[in-house]
Every structure is written in structure tokens, then in C-alpha cells.
């Protein structure tokens, strides 16, 4: 299950972690349970899972969404749910039924019990109808912002594609930017691939740039132009290919420097770059 780092949404002054897989959103049951019991949120979750209605709902959700779900084990839980002796934890539910709608994450930071957003809203109803309403509102706001961000990224990719097409079809202009690497630079051994790219594109390592620019708070890449950032992205991909081909640093530096010269001179005055630079 491909994942990325947690995001946080704030509901009624309380933080609720959002754990994103490649395709789905999981929210923290643990954080929501703290609305009912701040010191022992797991007891709130376990109490919710004892209910017959809860077991029936999460079992039906798994039946619809999880082809590897174990229905026989689910039926056994459902037959006992609600009785005074019945107890069910998220870990037991996951292990026994092969459930995917509820997940348990370990760790002091970012750990806890998470559930698919559809299951989370069912839990939030049990915890507090008011809290559920605010949770849905914040979740919708987050999804709207995500869609806007994706739209912006898509437009950016379209613009970069146009720029790269121009890079590959334009003739090299007379003006050379950046300068060609010197023999001394080519023979140097660079501690990181990042500095190799810095020399090829900017003519300096990060340390050399900082020494020459003491008044600037950022780093060499923070101060790069949009054209340089476009070329840097292309150079990173090219460098990866050259590494796989077994080329030494000195050879790669010369080739990457020529790439930087060719692409940057081609991008000078490019109208797509100008529009992209003023769009922000």
C-alpha cells in the first residue's frame, strides 16, 4: 500500500491526522476519539467496535470494497457482537478478517488507529453528531484544495512540456550561459551529485555560492530563475541515465554543462516561460 506522510485537518480546535494511500484517504479514529476521552482514546474505539451495528457496517464495507476480506470470520463476530462478553479491538478485527478499511499504525508520532473516510464518518456519528458535521466540512474543504492544486500542477506540466519541446527544437544561440566548466572543475571530485549539478548549471558548488553571496539567506537553488529550475529538472533525469551508463564524474560534468548551456540559451526569451513566471 503506497503511502505518504500524514496531513492534518483542524476540527473544532482539534487536530485530526489524515493518512493518505495512493488512492484513498484514512483519518485518525484515535484523534476523533479524543473528543470523547482525551486520556484513553483507544477505549472509545473499542467500545464502538463492540456494537452490533458497528460490526455489521464495517463488515459490509469490507465485503463491498475488499476482495480479500474473510466473510466467515466476519459472520462469527457479527453473531457475538453486542453481547456483554464481546470485545473487539481494531488489531483483532484486522488480523482475523484481513480488513483494509481500518488500519493500525505504530509509532509515537503519526501512530494510532486510522479508518477509511466512509468508516470514519460512521464513527464520528457515534462520537458526536456536531463533531461529525464539522469534520465533513473540513474534509470537503481539504479535498477542494487538493483538486485546485492538482489542476495547477497539470497546467504547470503542460507549460513545461511546451518549454521542453522548444528546448529540443531550437538552435543553439551565440550567447553561452552558463560558462563552460574549467579543466580544474572537471578534474575535481564532488562529494554529492547535487554539487555536480550546481557546478554544471551555476558554475559553483553550494558552498562556493554561499561564500560569494553572504548577504543572501537562501541557497543557490532558492535564488535560481524559473529557466534554471526547468533545466535543473531535466539535468537530474539526464544525470541518472549517465550514472547508469557508468560514466565518471568528470565526463558527466562536461556533458551536463553542455546540456545546461544548450537548454538555457534556448529558453531565453521563451514566451511560455514569461507567462509561467508572471502567473504566480
Image (cartoon, helix red, strand yellow):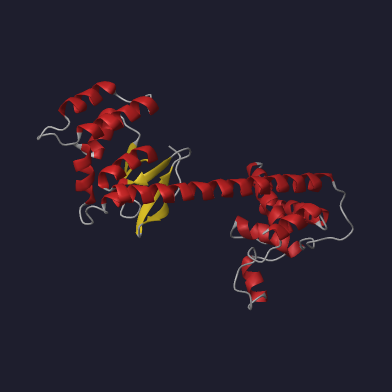
Identity of the residue furthest to the top in this view: 72
Image quadrant where residue 63 sits: top left
Question: Is 125 on the left or on the right of 162, as rendered?
Answer: left
The quarter of the rendered structure image containing the C terminus is bottom right
Identity of the residue furthest to the left in this view: 84
- Percent coordinates x, y for residue 11 in the rendering: 37, 55
Identity of the residue furthest to the bottom in this view: 215
Q: Decide which of 168, 79 is in the foreground and name it.
A: 79
Question: Is 74 on the left or on the right of 7, as rendered?
Answer: left
Question: Is 131 on the left or on the right of 243, as rendered?
Answer: left
The quarter of the rendered structure image containing the N terminus is top left
Identity of the residue furthest to the right in this view: 174
- At a point 31% along the width and 50% down the height, the residue shown is 130
- At a point 77% along the width and 57% down the height, the residue shown is 274
Position above or below: 241 against 192:
above
- Percent coordinates x, y for residue 222 in the rendering: 63, 65
Amino acid at each position: 500500500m503506497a503511502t505518504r506522510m500524514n496531513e492534518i485537518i483542524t476540527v473544532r480546535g482539534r487536530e485530526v491526522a489524515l493518512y493518505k494511500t495512493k488512492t484513498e484517504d484514512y483519518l485518525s479514529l484515535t484523534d476523533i476519539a479524543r473528543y470523547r476521552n482525551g486520556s484513553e482514546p483507544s477505549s472509545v474505539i473499542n467500545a464502538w467496535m463492540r456494537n452490533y451495528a458497528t460490526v455489521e457496517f464495517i463488515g459490509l464495507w469490507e465485503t463491498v470494497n475488499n476482495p480479500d476480506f474473510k466473510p466467515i470470520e466476519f459472520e462469527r463476530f457479527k453473531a457475538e457482537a453486542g453481547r456483554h462478553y464481546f470485545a473487539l479491538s481494531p488489531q483483532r478485527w484486522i488480523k482475523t478478517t484481513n480488513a483494509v478499511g481500518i488500519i493500525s499504525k505504530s509509532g509515537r508520532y503519526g501512530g494510532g488507529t486510522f479508518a477509511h473516510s466512509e468508516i470514519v464518518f460512521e464513527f464520528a456519528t457515534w462520537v458526536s453528531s456536531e463533531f461529525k458535521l464539522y469534520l465533513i466540512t473540513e474534509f470537503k474543504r481539504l479535498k477542494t484544495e487538493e483538486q485546485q492544486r492538482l489542476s495547477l500542477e497539470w497546467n504547470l506540466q503542460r507549460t513545461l512540456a511546451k518549454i521542453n519541446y522548444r528546448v529540443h527544437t531550437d538552435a543553439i544561440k551565440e550567447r553561452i550561459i552558463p560558462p563552460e566548466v574549467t579543466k580544474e572543475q572537471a578534474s575535481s571530485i564532488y562529494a554529492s551529485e547535487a554539487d555536480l549539478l550546481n557546478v554544471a548549471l551555476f558554475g559553483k558548488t553550494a558552498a562556493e555560492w554561499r561564500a560569494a553571496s553572504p548577504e543572501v539567506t537562501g541557497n543557490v537553488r532558492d535564488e535560481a530563475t524559473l529557466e534554471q529550475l526547468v533545466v535543473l529538472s531535466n539535468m537530474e533525469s539526464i544525470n541518472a541515465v549517465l550514472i547508469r551508463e557508468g560514466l565518471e564524474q568528470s565526463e558527466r560534468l562536461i556533458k551536463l554543462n553542455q546540456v545546461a548551456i544548450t537548454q538555457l540559451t534556448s529558453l531565453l526569451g521563451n514566451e511560455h516561460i514569461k507567462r509561467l513566471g508572471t502567473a504566480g
